[in-house]
Amino acid sequence: MNSHRKKIEEYIDLHRHEAISFLQKVVRQPSLQGNETGVQEIVIEKLKQLNLEIDRWDPPHAELSKHSYFVESRKSYENSPNVVGVLHGTGGGKSIILNGHIDVVPEGDGTKWTDDPFSGKIENGKMFGRGTTDMKGGNVSLILALESIIKSGIKLKGDVIFESVIEEETGGVGTLATILRGYKADAAIIPEPTNMKLFIKQQGSMWFRVTVEGRSAHGGTRYEGISAIEQSWKVFNAIMDLEKRRNAFITDPLYKTIPIPLPINIGKIQGGSWPSSVADLVTLEGRIGVGPEENMDDVRNELKACLIDISKNDEWLKEHQPKLEFFGGQWVPNAVANDHPFVDVLIENYTVVYKKSVIIEASPWGTDGGLLGKVGLIPTLIIGPGETKMAHYPDEFIDLEEVIKAAKLFAFTIIEWCGVFEKA
Amino acid sequence: MNSHRKKIEEYIDLHRHEAISFLQKVVRQPSLQGNETGVQEIVIEKLKQLNLEIDRWDPPHAELSKHSYFVESRKSYENSPNVVGVLHGTGGGKSIILNGHIDVVPEGDGTKWTDDPFSGKIENGKMFGRGTTDMKGGNVSLILALESIIKSGIKLKGDVIFESVIEEETGGVGTLATILRGYKADAAIIPEPTNMKLFIKQQGSMWFRVTVEGRSAHGGTRYEGISAIEQSWKVFNAIMDLEKRRNAFITDPLYKTIPIPLPINIGKIQGGSWPSSVADLVTLEGRIGVGPEENMDDVRNELKACLIDISKNDEWLKEHQPKLEFFGGQWVPNAVANDHPFVDVLIENYTVVYKKSVIIEASPWGTDGGLLGKVGLIPTLIIGPGETKMAHYPDEFIDLEEVIKAAKLFAFTIIEWCGVFEKA
């Protein structure tokens, strides 16, 4: 094994610049929702160079929409291809899925970015741009790992399935489509930005919308109306109290360093139509975290109950119950047993590459690992370069050294898990 | 005088149905900003029937925009005519302006209306529709008053200037344009909906926008970001505290029955772009009331100071000072002396028509009376049918009996103020 590792390490060190240049090319393709073709074609070109068996298809909306874990993000995925590249093993080994999403969230307020949000600019060993951390950097680590194995002439026993999927940011339709298309394996890695911590449990989440009513009136006699904005403050506070209650009794040691293990984020607010009228409608939109062992429906019911509770003793809200909907994004939680052999393989190889023990945590956010775990029944670990706090943030960047180093860890993990075919 | 009053009263009672039908026609024209031509043509047709001298013109943006009381509501008033009709007196009397705005605010959430917002439907003596109360009902009272005088063959000594103006709801460009065009008089009435209380003082107001910054982050690690929504709550509360402070020491007896003499209404909120991102920007839009004796600039400075104050001791806000702008609507406050002769004339005739004393108050909202008073130097009284609380409200309606009765008061007031030319 050590000689294989040596070859891999040498290959990666020798080809780091090509890998970085490839990452830059990928980052410069703004693969926002509905605009994934350009970047997927670059991925395909790369996978073809590695002689992988390519599968490119637009996830079929009609079929997917019947699945109980389907999250409606749009009415069609036409021209938004998923890409899978398969490296067939010689047989007798364990298979692995390498999964990364290629979609990125919008760049937000452009003025907060120092450079163009899709510049891919490199400075002091960091590459900047939307998607560098979340999660094109991790994807390139996977590809570089695979490339290093193939180009070093190492033959694997088990199959490797590389998946470049769409729609993770809106709930995982891309990954769900890979599972329904039949892609299964004995284990999976998703290199979401964990700063190379190992997340063996991961939080799920759901999007929700609360509509709060008021009663309009002329602003000059605002006391004749009921401000939906003021009412929405109550709802906001009640939901934040629910977050406190939900987090107060979390004892899982994996969450001990996380300030808020199961966050509720209210990310959007909109209400009123005229500065001098009392607002008669406010909508709040947010995401609620779902614990690794929690059931999605239980969490839905908790949020429902919270809104019923504040309405009970409120003169206005009891007659004008805030309306709760779950819409858009939904990420299923997941957990892998501590003593699963794949966890051992990863921990061991981490020590080899990083000369220290890996930090094991539970993720504060959902990934497609929930679908791979709950629907595909595939033990899935989340570990990747980049810091979570850069994701969805202006001036998002990734430390390039981390991308390269992660590739070594992934390559070592793959060869050990899949097994190397040695000539008799 | 009593015989004139008798003739007027008879005329009005005999023609109430025509007047109501005319009001219905006017209400059915949704004269929202930029869409005033249709309704003004109906007004012109009516004024022509009364043989008034008609002046119809589009307020000239270039000229108006140089005026210090100009409020920018749009870049051109082309095809948004003002209409003035003048009834020339025989000479030697005092002149009067009858001013009413023809623009209406948007209907808001259409689902809250029982019928179409511009139905003009009549039920139980009430007419429903956007603008019935604010203030097409009052306008029709003025026209009916004028009509009753003319058709009763009463000749006035002083001139009567009837003004059907645009853009009151956004700060009074229409009325400003009448003043700059040279329309002046010894007194003015604006029949905004006061429920026939007499407002001798009136509050001004200004629109403002506060932009509150946050720092974006992934919703799953929301503790890495700063929610602009949470920050905007602080700003909202600070502004509401300012409202309390500004109202705590108001001793003017005219305000004693008003729950909040000088209201601050935050009517719009908007922020965040993604449910699972921490919001990095929230804007609040509102209107702040300006007391009858207050100076607009002083109030601007109070609001500025309030935002500086909350920022001083706040770790985040002191580095990210909320940005304050004044934009859009602005209504100048006004006050008429208690002992002005026009006040006496109105009070006296109110007693004749209503068989009780008029209630005198200070208005909780601004009208074009501020411009007539401060720019035109015309003593202006606000009194009209309809309840303020219906203005800007779904299912806005006006009690038709009130429209008819107000016409009598206005006609009696006009003949006494302008003087009747009696044959020698």
Image: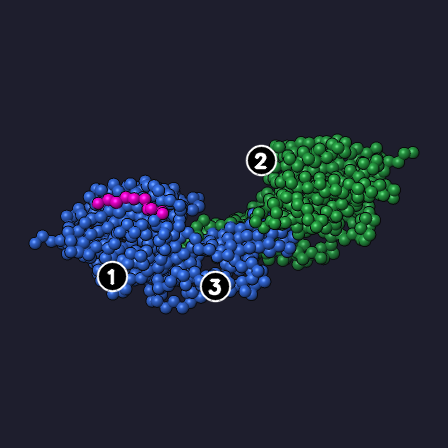
Chain colours: A blue, B green
Q: Secondary structure at mark 1?
A: helix
Q: Is residue B69 magenta?
A: no
Q: Which residue is mark 1?
A: A343
Name of the residue lying farthest toward the left: A424
Residue B291 % position (x, y)? 68, 50
- Near-viewer residue (A85 or A14): A85
Q: Chain of mark 2?
A: B
| Label 1 neighbour load within 10 Å: few <14, some 14-19, many 20+ | some
Q: Chain of mark 3?
A: A
Residue at 68% from the left image edge and 49% from the top image edge: B123
A327 versus A238 height, above or below:
above
Of the residues shown, which amino acid type is indicated by label 1? Answer: Val
| B376 relative to B94 in the view: left or right | left
Residue B97 % position (x, y)? 75, 39
Residue at 48% from the left image edge and 63% from the top image edge: A306
Residue at 57% from the left image edge and 55% from the top image edge: A214
Q: CA distance from mark 1 to mark 2?
A: 66 Å
Q: Secondary structure at mark 3?
A: helix
Q: Magenta span covers which residues? A: A53-62
- Quadrant in which the N terminus of chain A is drawn: bottom left
- Near-viewer residue (A191 or B4): B4
Q: Which residue is mark 3?
A: A305
Q: Chain of mark 1?
A: A
- Quadrant in which the C terminus of chain A is drawn: bottom left
Residue contact at pointers 2 and 3, CB within 8 angstroms: no
Q: Which mark is residue A413?
A: none
Of the residues shown, which amino acid type is indicated by label 2? Answer: Lys
Q: Which mark is residue B75?
A: 2
Q: CA distance from mark 3 to mark 1?
A: 38 Å
